[in-house]
Image (spheres, rainbow, N blue to C red):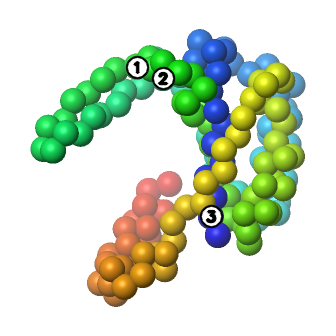
Amino acid sequence: MRFMIMVKADKNTEAGVLPDEKLLTDMGKYNEELVKAGVMLAGEGLHPSSKGARVKFSGAKRTVVDGPFTEAKELIAGFWLIQVKSKEEAIEWVKRVPNPTGEESEIEIRQVFEAEDFGPAFTPELKQQEEKIRAQAARNR
Protein backbone atom coordinates (compact mmCIF):
# COMPACT_ATOMS: atom_id res chain seq x y z
CA MET A 1 0.00 0.00 0.00
CA ARG A 2 1.27 3.43 -0.90
CA PHE A 3 0.46 6.52 1.13
CA MET A 4 0.98 10.21 0.47
CA ILE A 5 2.05 11.95 3.66
CA MET A 6 1.34 15.69 3.35
CA VAL A 7 2.81 18.35 5.62
CA LYS A 8 0.33 21.21 5.91
CA ALA A 9 1.55 24.74 5.28
CA ASP A 10 1.39 27.55 7.81
CA LYS A 11 2.05 31.30 7.82
CA ASN A 12 5.81 30.71 8.00
CA THR A 13 6.05 28.22 5.13
CA GLU A 14 3.83 30.50 3.05
CA ALA A 15 6.13 33.44 3.89
CA GLY A 16 9.07 31.44 2.52
CA VAL A 17 10.70 30.95 5.95
CA LEU A 18 13.20 28.13 5.52
CA PRO A 19 13.75 25.44 8.15
CA ASP A 20 16.67 25.92 10.52
CA GLU A 21 19.70 23.63 10.66
CA LYS A 22 18.27 21.52 13.51
CA LEU A 23 15.03 20.76 11.65
CA LEU A 24 16.95 19.99 8.44
CA THR A 25 19.21 17.63 10.42
CA ASP A 26 16.25 15.95 12.16
CA MET A 27 14.36 15.56 8.87
CA GLY A 28 17.49 14.15 7.21
CA LYS A 29 17.77 11.52 9.95
CA TYR A 30 14.07 10.69 9.63
CA ASN A 31 14.40 10.35 5.85
CA GLU A 32 17.39 8.03 6.35
CA GLU A 33 15.24 5.85 8.63
CA LEU A 34 12.52 5.68 5.97
CA VAL A 35 15.04 4.73 3.29
CA LYS A 36 16.80 2.14 5.45
CA ALA A 37 13.42 0.58 6.27
CA GLY A 38 12.70 0.41 2.53
CA VAL A 39 9.46 2.41 2.74
CA MET A 40 10.33 5.82 1.25
CA LEU A 41 9.54 6.23 -2.43
CA ALA A 42 9.83 10.04 -2.59
CA GLY A 43 9.82 13.09 -0.39
CA GLU A 44 10.16 16.80 -1.04
CA GLY A 45 9.48 20.22 0.42
CA LEU A 46 7.47 22.68 -1.64
CA HIS A 47 7.98 26.38 -2.29
CA PRO A 48 5.25 28.70 -0.97
CA SER A 49 2.07 29.10 -2.99
CA SER A 50 3.20 32.62 -4.01
CA LYS A 51 5.51 30.85 -6.46
CA GLY A 52 2.76 28.54 -7.71
CA ALA A 53 -0.37 28.64 -9.83
CA ARG A 54 -3.68 26.85 -10.12
CA VAL A 55 -5.47 25.88 -13.29
CA LYS A 56 -9.26 26.01 -12.95
CA PHE A 57 -11.36 23.84 -15.25
CA SER A 58 -14.85 24.72 -16.45
CA GLY A 59 -15.86 22.37 -19.25
CA ALA A 60 -13.32 22.96 -22.03
CA LYS A 61 -12.18 26.31 -20.57
CA ARG A 62 -8.94 26.62 -18.57
CA THR A 63 -8.17 29.60 -16.34
CA VAL A 64 -4.79 30.12 -14.67
CA VAL A 65 -4.71 31.76 -11.24
CA ASP A 66 -1.32 32.73 -9.86
CA GLY A 67 -0.53 32.35 -6.15
CA PRO A 68 -0.35 33.18 -3.37
CA PHE A 69 -3.43 31.37 -2.15
CA THR A 70 -5.34 32.09 1.03
CA GLU A 71 -5.98 29.63 3.84
CA ALA A 72 -2.40 28.48 4.44
CA LYS A 73 -3.65 25.59 6.60
CA GLU A 74 -5.30 24.08 3.51
CA LEU A 75 -2.06 24.17 1.50
CA ILE A 76 0.75 21.62 1.36
CA ALA A 77 4.32 22.53 2.37
CA GLY A 78 5.90 19.16 1.63
CA PHE A 79 5.26 15.46 1.21
CA TRP A 80 6.52 11.92 1.41
CA LEU A 81 5.36 8.99 -0.67
CA ILE A 82 5.82 5.78 1.30
CA GLN A 83 5.02 2.12 0.74
CA VAL A 84 3.96 0.16 3.82
CA LYS A 85 1.71 -2.77 4.71
CA SER A 86 -1.17 -0.81 6.29
CA LYS A 87 -2.61 2.56 7.23
CA GLU A 88 -1.64 1.78 10.81
CA GLU A 89 2.00 1.40 9.79
CA ALA A 90 1.82 4.70 7.90
CA ILE A 91 0.43 6.36 11.02
CA GLU A 92 3.28 4.95 13.11
CA TRP A 93 5.83 6.40 10.67
CA VAL A 94 4.11 9.80 10.71
CA LYS A 95 4.10 9.87 14.51
CA ARG A 96 7.91 9.79 14.28
CA VAL A 97 8.19 12.82 11.94
CA PRO A 98 10.04 15.71 13.58
CA ASN A 99 7.47 18.46 14.22
CA PRO A 100 7.74 20.54 11.02
CA THR A 101 7.00 23.85 12.76
CA GLY A 102 7.97 23.13 16.34
CA GLU A 103 4.51 24.41 17.25
CA GLU A 104 0.98 23.45 16.22
CA SER A 105 1.13 21.54 12.93
CA GLU A 106 -0.73 18.85 11.03
CA ILE A 107 0.26 16.06 8.69
CA GLU A 108 -2.32 14.33 6.51
CA ILE A 109 -2.14 10.69 5.40
CA ARG A 110 -3.89 9.58 2.21
CA GLN A 111 -3.76 6.20 0.52
CA VAL A 112 -2.74 6.18 -3.13
CA PHE A 113 -4.93 4.26 -5.57
CA GLU A 114 -3.51 1.03 -6.96
CA ALA A 115 -4.52 -0.50 -10.30
CA GLU A 116 -6.67 -3.19 -8.65
CA ASP A 117 -8.72 -0.53 -6.84
CA PHE A 118 -10.37 0.43 -10.16
CA GLY A 119 -11.95 -2.99 -10.76
CA PRO A 120 -13.04 -4.15 -14.23
CA ALA A 121 -12.98 -0.60 -15.67
CA PHE A 122 -9.19 -0.87 -15.57
CA THR A 123 -8.89 -3.21 -18.56
CA PRO A 124 -5.77 -5.27 -19.36
CA GLU A 125 -4.98 -2.75 -22.11
CA LEU A 126 -5.18 0.16 -19.66
CA LYS A 127 -3.05 -1.76 -17.16
CA GLN A 128 -0.42 -2.40 -19.83
CA GLN A 129 -0.46 1.29 -20.79
CA GLU A 130 -0.06 2.29 -17.12
CA GLU A 131 2.90 -0.07 -16.64
CA LYS A 132 4.58 1.35 -19.76
CA ILE A 133 4.08 4.93 -18.54
CA ARG A 134 5.46 4.11 -15.07
CA ALA A 135 8.53 2.44 -16.60
CA GLN A 136 9.15 5.50 -18.80
CA ALA A 137 8.69 7.84 -15.84
CA ALA A 138 11.17 5.81 -13.75
CA ARG A 139 13.78 6.25 -16.48
CA ASN A 140 13.23 10.04 -16.31
CA ARG A 141 14.47 10.24 -12.72
| Whether residue 41 can be seen here | no
Question: Could you tell whether 62 is left or right of 121 in the image?
Answer: left
Element class at badge 1: loop
* Labelled pair 2, 1 in contact (Cβ < 8 Å): yes
Q: CA distance from mark 3 to mark 1?
A: 29 Å
User: Toward which corner of the image does residue 18 lie, by quadrant?
Assistant: top right
Q: Position of residue 106 (x, y in %)?
A: 72, 35
Give the mark, 3 or 2, whose residue is nearer the N terminus.
3
Question: Could you tell whether 84 is left or right of 16 in the image?
Answer: right
Q: Position of residue 42 (x, y in %)?
A: 62, 52
Q: Which mark is residue 49?
A: 2
Q: Which mark is residue 67?
A: 1
| Whether residue 78 can be seen here | yes
Q: 88 above or below 50?
A: below
Q: Residues within 10 Å of mark 2 (few under 14, many from 20)?
A: many
Question: Could you tell whether 34 is left or right of 68 in the image?
Answer: right
Which residue is depicted at the point 62% across and 36% down? 78
What amino acid type should be assigned to the residue bearing mark 1? Gly
Q: CA distance from mark 3 to mark 2?
A: 26 Å
Q: 94 above or below 22?
A: below
Give the mark, 3 or 1, whose residue is nearer the N terminus.
3
Q: Which mark is residue 2?
A: 3
